[in-house]
Amino acid sequence: MISRDEVRHVAELARLELTDEELERIGGQLGAILQSIEKIGELDLSGVPPTANPLNLTNVLRPDEPQEELSVEQALANAPEVEGNLFVVPRID
């Protein structure tokens, strides 16, 4: 179980200002998470190979291959405002 002071300390590190009610609720939630982690630590995982992700992920991006560059007209085709061959962007003060 995690103490109220530990929850307050973690909240301060995260720059969170918690009410007494939130400290109590989050303390209970963190305690449940820590208990779950302890249960996982009790398992015999000696035959399980290390993995970074339980899902079989595949890359959905296309290969990075050189292609024809856009013409100035194509690059500026959807710009809301153009001046010469440049995008016009609003000034930020």
Image: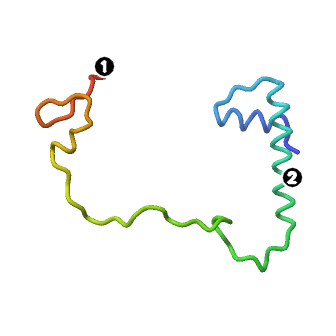
Q: Which residue is mark 2?
A: 35
Q: CA distance from mark 2 to mark 1?
A: 51 Å
N-terminal label among 2 and 1: 2
- How packed mark 1 is, by other alpha carbons closer than 10 Å (few <14, some 14-19, many 20 or more), is few
- Indicate the amino acid at tag 2: Gln
Per the rendering, the mark at residue 76 is none
Task: Spot the residue most to the bottom.
Answer: 47
- Indicate the amino acid at tag 1: Asp
Task: Spot the residue most to the left.
Answer: 84
- Which element is circle 1 on? loop
Quadrant of the image occupied by residue 55 = bottom right
Residue 32 placement (x, y as % from top left): 86, 46
Q: Residue at x 88, y 45 (%)?
A: 1
Observer-nearest of 70 and 28: 70
56 lies above or below 48: above
Quadrant of the image occupied by residue 91 = top left
